[in-house]
Image: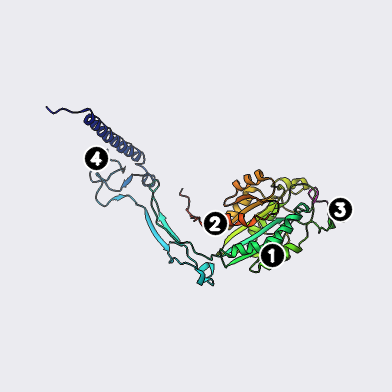
């Protein structure tokens, strides 16, 4: 009689346990199928189950929904499988130094571009993509700046750094556009002193207060950026928080007025040294109408509904940023924790601290650019199944 060692006995026990586990799993799957004997749609939505249209025999104990087709007439089972259909598959292109005239819409970095999937619930399916990072991909950079009086030094520093920022970005892409906008706050009490004399000149060498102004739509001429930033005067308001969210939403949704290109990486730098008003604060001025999330700029680029609509909510900013694919950089010189928390609530945004002279703004922009240029975002338009 052969002698069975402890090691062999353990191996047999493990094998037996594995077999019993598989049998139990099969029985459990079979039971989960049988509960859907009265519904074909529920049956084929259940992983591992298939529907029998016509039985092979006449046994009354047969189940229409089962994990096998043993009792079903040949060719009479409904057991749909995952299906993949590639609908758009343009060839990858690579824009190099010699291809600087290639427009963004002609650049293909991911293939395939669109696929159609028909999937069974609980059944995974692998899709293979190819990606090639193109150089000289178009970049739009809009600088949105708080121009209340406390930001005077930052404004002057930014004017001096404009050419440096543009030069840094042009080392990454030849298709670079730069724009500039400014904000203060709603021109209503208690946010702004509306006494006529103070409203005209709220501080020394200041302009009349305003909510948001699109000073310079996106432009290839970065010299304009330096000129506009240098020449635009600061203004003033009453309380510490500013109307930055009003301005931020307008920059995001007013695509035509700002000049956002369809095929471009979109960066929005938000610069301030103060906290922000948010949804609900407008009630302090009797403004109870919630923000509608729409664009409200006049022909001069001024926000027209500052006294009609409440400040937008953080959720509205997040939704608009995602829908318009805007990458926001909160470049602040104070309130780091506040803007870090805000950034965590807005997709594709980041936060960085400006130094005393705002000289590191180009570093913050490059960090965010490198981040988004190394990411691939896939989206779906899956319809809900009742």
Instruction: Identify the residue at image location x=39%, y=49%.
Output: 124
Q: Earlier in the sequence, mark 2 or mark 4?
A: 4
Q: Residues within 10 Å of mark 1 (few under 14, many from 20)?
A: many
Place of residue 133 in the rendered image (x, y in percent of width and height, measured from the top left): 48, 61
Mark 3 lies on residue: 195
Inter-mark Cα distance, 2 to 4: 66 Å
- 251 above or below 37? below
Q: Earlier in the sequence, mark 4 or mark 1?
A: 4
Residue that lies at the very extreme toward the right in this rendered image = 197
* Residue 356 as seen in the image, left or right of residue 100: right
Mark 2 lies on residue: 370
Q: Earlier in the sequence, mark 3 or mark 2?
A: 3
Q: Earlier in the sequence, mark 4 or mark 3?
A: 4
Question: Which quadrant is the N terminus positioned in?
Answer: top left
- Tag shown at residue 59: 4
Instruction: Find numbered disc 2 in the image and state the secondary structure of the residue it sits on.
Output: helix
Instruction: Identify the residue at image location x=38%, y=57%.
Output: 84
Residue that lies at the very extreme toward the left in this rendered image = 1
Inter-mark Cα distance, 2 to 1: 23 Å
Is-magenta flag for residue 103? no
What type of secondary structure mainly makes up the magenta span? Answer: loop
Q: Which residues are magenta?
A: 188-194
Q: Earlier in the sequence, mark 2 or mark 1?
A: 1
Q: Nearer the viewer, residue 376 or 249?
A: 376
Q: Are marks 3 and 2 in contact (CB under 8 Å)?
A: no
Is-magenta flag for residue 193? yes
């Amino acid at each position: 009689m052969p002698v069975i060692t402890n090691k062999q006995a353990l191996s047999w026990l493990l094998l037996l346990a594995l077999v019993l586990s598989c049998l139990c799993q099969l029985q459990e799957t079979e039971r989960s199928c049988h509960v859907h004997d009265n519904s074909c749609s529920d049956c084929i939505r259940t992983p591992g189950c298939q529907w029998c249209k016509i039985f092979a025999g006449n046994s009354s104990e047969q189940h229409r929904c089962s994990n096998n087709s043993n009792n079903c007439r040949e060719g009479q089972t409904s057991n749909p499988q995952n299906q993949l259909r590639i609908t758009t598959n343009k060839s990858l292109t690579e824009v190099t130094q010699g291809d600087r005239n290639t427009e963004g819409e002609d650049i293909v970095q991911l293939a395939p571009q669109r696929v159609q999937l028909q999937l069974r619930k609980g059944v995974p399916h692998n899709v293979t993509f190819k990606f090639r990072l193109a150089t000289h991909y178009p970049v739009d950079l809009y600088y949105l700046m708080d121009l209340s009086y406390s930001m005077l030094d930052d404004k002057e520093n930014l004017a001096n750094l404009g050419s440096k920022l543009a030069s840094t970005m042009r080392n990454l892409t030849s298709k670079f556009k730069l724009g500039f906008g400014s904000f203060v706050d709603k021109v209503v009490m208690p946010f702004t002193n509306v006494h006529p004399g103070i409203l005209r000149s709220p501080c020394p060498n200041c302009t009349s207060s305003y909510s948001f102004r699109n000073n310079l739509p996106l432009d290839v001429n970065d010299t304009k950026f330096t000129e506009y930033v240098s020449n635009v005067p600061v203004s003033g308001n009453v309380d510490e928080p500013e109307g930055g969210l009003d301005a931020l939403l307008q920059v995001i949704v007013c695509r035509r007025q700002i000049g956002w290109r369809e095929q471009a990486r979109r960066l929005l730098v938000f610069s301030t040294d103060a906290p922000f008003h948010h949804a609900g604060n407008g009630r302090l001025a009797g403004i109870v109408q919630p923000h509608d999330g729409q664009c409200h700029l006049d022909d001069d680029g001024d926000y027209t509904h500052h006294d009609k609509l409440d400040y937008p909510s953080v959720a509205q900013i997040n939704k608009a940023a995602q829908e318009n694919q805007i990458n926001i950089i909160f470049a602040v010189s104070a309130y780091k924790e506040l803007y870090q928390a805000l950034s965590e609530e807005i997709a594709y945004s980041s936060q960085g601290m400006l130094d005393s002279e705002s000289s590191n703004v180009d570093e913050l922009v490059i960090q965010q650019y490198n981040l988004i240029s190394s990411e691939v975002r896939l989206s779906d338009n899956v319809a809900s199944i009742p």
